[in-house]
Image (cartoon, grey):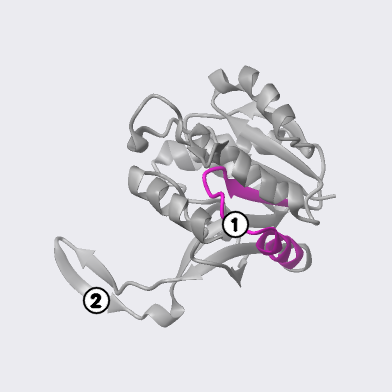
Amino acid sequence: MNAAIVVAAGKGIRMGGTEPKQFLELRGVPIIVHTLQRFEQCETINQVVLVLPADALAGFQSLAKKFSLRKISRVVAGGPTRAQSVLSGLRAIDAAEVVAVHDGVRPFVTSAEIDRVVETARTSGAAVLVAPVTDTIKEVLEHSIAQTLPRVSLRRALTPQCFRYEILKLAYERLSELETEGTEVTDDSFLVERLGVKPIAVEGSGQNIKITGPEDLALAEAILRGQ
């Protein structure tokens, strides 16, 4: 059995307004529902743990019923950081072979992409969906460009990021210590890499955007029109 943790516990302050960004609508459907529907349609995920802001838990049940979201096994409250929200979701999973962690505001991941990353993690232990870097990337030190990094070896980390359950659980055991030290935990792969595990990169689509600001919302509408 494989599980997914869909993290949507943020307040969306960069979007502006009072509505958390995961509940803003694209063509009449909340962003988080678009995302969850991708997991409903994929073959490799058996259950979904959804992580939401604490004040959104009570109201989500009616939304799940309205859109026939049948794979959701638990809805839990998130923490003050993304990593702590993932940990809340991980604690809600008793057992699984592979756990997929996905940002709730990435509604354009495809079910086929999810299946590919899960299957890769099942055989290798860890896998991350990535996309090519199209911009030229500069390393900047003290306001000066130190070097230009070769794009051929660079990728943007997307989600889902998938791991065998025992690997992800072990990786998160040091989260509190790292955050106390002030270490920025940018994604789940970062924690797993610290164990000496090298996740496999699975090529995905650049359309798998993370909706964080108004410009992303406009791009999301354009992507939907194209689909």
Residue lying at 56% horizontally and 29% vertically, measured from the top left: 78
Residue 123 position, x and y percent, is: 78, 68
Residue lying at 45% horizontally and 50% vertically, measured from the top left: 221
Residue 186 position, x and y percent, is: 46, 50
Question: Label 2 amino acid?
Answer: Gln
Residue lying at 33% horizontally and 32% vertically, measured from the top left: 16
- Mark pair 2, 1: CA separation: 33 Å
- Give neighbour class at mark 1: few <14, some 14-19, many 20+ (Cα, 10 Å): many
Comes first in the chain, label 2 or label 1? 1
Question: Which of 187 and 184 lies nearest the eye of the viewer?
Answer: 187
- Return the residue at label 2: 147
Q: Is residue 141 magenta?
A: no
Residue range corresponding to the magenta coloring: 99-120
Horizontal relation, residue 138 to residue 47: left or right: left
SS of the residue under disc 2? strand
Question: Is residue 173 visible from the viewing direction of this image?
Answer: no
Vertical placement of 16 versus 156: above or below? above
- Return the residue at label 1: 109
Report which quarter residue 169 is drawn in. Answer: top right
Residue 72 position, x and y percent, is: 75, 36
Question: Which of 96 and 207 lies nearest the eye of the viewer?
Answer: 207
Question: Which of 33 and 6 lies nearest the eye of the viewer?
Answer: 33
